[in-house]
Amino acid sequence: NNVAELADSLGYNYTFATEFVELGPIASMLGIDAKKYFGLHGNAILSKYTIKNAEVVRLPDSYKWYEEEFKKRSPLEGARRIGAKRIFKEQILSEIRRGGRNAIIADIELPNKEIITVVSIHLEDRCFPKGRFKQTEFLLNKLKYKNTPIVLAGDFNTTTSDSIPTSLKKEIIKRI
């Protein structure tokens, strides 16, 4: 539990929310004992000050990791993966996961007794900007009634494209 170890070493408080359990080929190839497997994707907030409460907000799905990663790959995606391996010595693996993107909303009490709200978010990267916009809009609707200063941070995965495996149809649509 990296977050607990880090918080413990710093003497901080923390909250953690799992987004995904990785079910990919790496875990099985390495012979990882499932009973000892703690490789979870998620969000965390570490704070020197008291975390008064924390809420996990499940964001709308913009990519179905489990279903989509099992789909048959197009010949174009196959060529892209071969090219990445041969030219760039980079292997593109399927990331078979269970779960979905989330955010943590935590109220933190400062030494002067003021409460601030800290938000850790992780937006989807395997979608176009409209998917991330939908997730952000959903979160902002959850936050609009807060009466505290808000700090919003995390992995926004800002890009004008997506990292969904490609296909001939997708490449034609991108160019049109």
Image: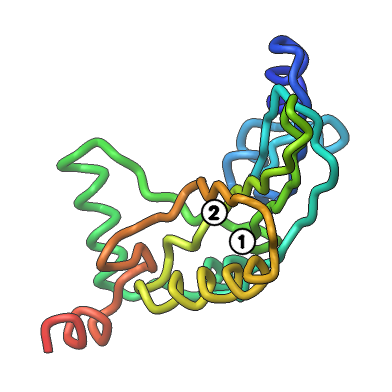
Where in the figure is residue 98, as x and y percent of width and height? Answer: 70, 60
- State the residue at coordinates (29%, 40%): 90
Q: Earlier in the sequence, mark 2 or mark 1?
A: 1
- State the residue at coordinates (42%, 60%): 125
Amino acid type for the residue under numbered disc 1: Arg
> SS at mark 2?
strand
For the C terminus, the image quarter is bottom left
> SS at mark 1?
loop
Where in the figure is residue 35, as x and y percent of width and height? Answer: 88, 35
Q: In this view, does 140 lie above or below 20?
A: below
Q: Is residue 82 above or below residue 135?
A: above
Near mark 2 (Cα within 10 A), the count class, few <14, some 14-19 or many ≥20, is many
Q: In this view, does 81 lie above or below 138?
A: above
The residue to which callout 1 is attached is 101
The residue to which callout 2 is attached is 122
Tell me if 143 is positioned left or right of 84 in this view: right
Q: Distance of mark 2 from mark 1, alpha carbons?
A: 6 Å
